[in-house]
Image (cartoon, rainbow, N blue to C red):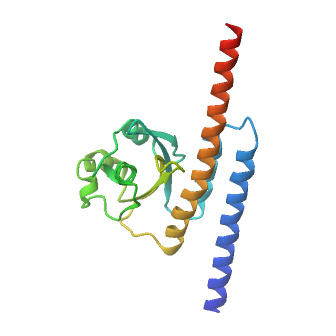
Amino acid sequence: IVINTRDITESYYSNRLEKLERDIFEKSALTGIDFHIIATNYLKDIEALHEGMLCSLLWVKNNKIHNLASPNLPSDYVNLIEGLEIGDNRGSCGTAAYTKQQVIVTDIETDIRWADFKDLVQPFGFKACWSMPIIDSRNEVIATFAMYYKESKSPSSHEHFVINRSAQILRIILENYRQVEEIKNANERFQYATNA
């Protein structure tokens, strides 16, 4: 019975995850849909699969992080981290973006990477934060995907799988989105130049 229950749970989890992935690819293929909305809905769905998880997706531009989607993080916290510089020991996302490595912080209170930011995060009750850099085909960090918890904890096998797989999916979607934006901007410049 235990084995059957585990198999059913695993099957349900895998099916839900596959559905989320199909949805984000289908939505991102449609023109005119704001990427912020697509990313926000995807993160909400990931959170719904994991009790207590809060996700964020941050752009990395000019060595600073900028919020792209953080559906259930407090807006005051999102505003506090907006524009922070990346670097070694700059929280989970700042460190992940700087080192191009996954950062697993199981206890924010005692981890050296959060030493300068403990006071900032304490009022919000976050205890753990895991971050994965999203690296494009040019080997540049374009974003970070993070998961917060209000308890000190290590990732489960499901959570490890999701953070790695979701980062890859978000990389594909972000690169496609960036290419569309670059083409759109180039067309606008061309139109401006030919009409001038």
Q: Position of residue 41 (x, y in %)?
A: 64, 48
Examine the image and state in which quarter residue 19 appears: bottom right
Q: Residue at x 49, y 61 (%)?
A: 52
Q: Position of residue 176 (x, y in %)?
A: 64, 44
Q: Residue at x 30, y 50 (%)?
A: 122
* In the image, farthest residue toward the bottom: 1
Q: Is residue 51 visible?
A: no
Whether residue 41 is situated above or below residue 158 in the rendered picture: above
Whether residue 30 is situated above or below residue 182 in the rendered picture: below
> Total of numbered circles in the picture?
0
Q: Position of residue 36 (x, y in %)?
A: 60, 40
Q: Is residue 138 left or right of residue 126?
A: right
* In the image, farthest residue toward the top: 196
Quarter that holds the C terminus = top right
Examine the image and state in which quarter residue 33 appears: top right
Q: Residue at x 38, y 40 (%)?
A: 81
Q: Position of residue 65 (x, y in %)?
A: 41, 40
Quarter that holds the N terminus = bottom right
Whether residue 45 is situated above or below residue 38 in the rendered picture: below
Q: Is residue 65 left or right of residue 45?
A: left
- Pick the front one: 154 or 53: 154
Q: Is residue 153 visible?
A: yes
Q: Residue at x 72, y 54 (%)?
A: 23
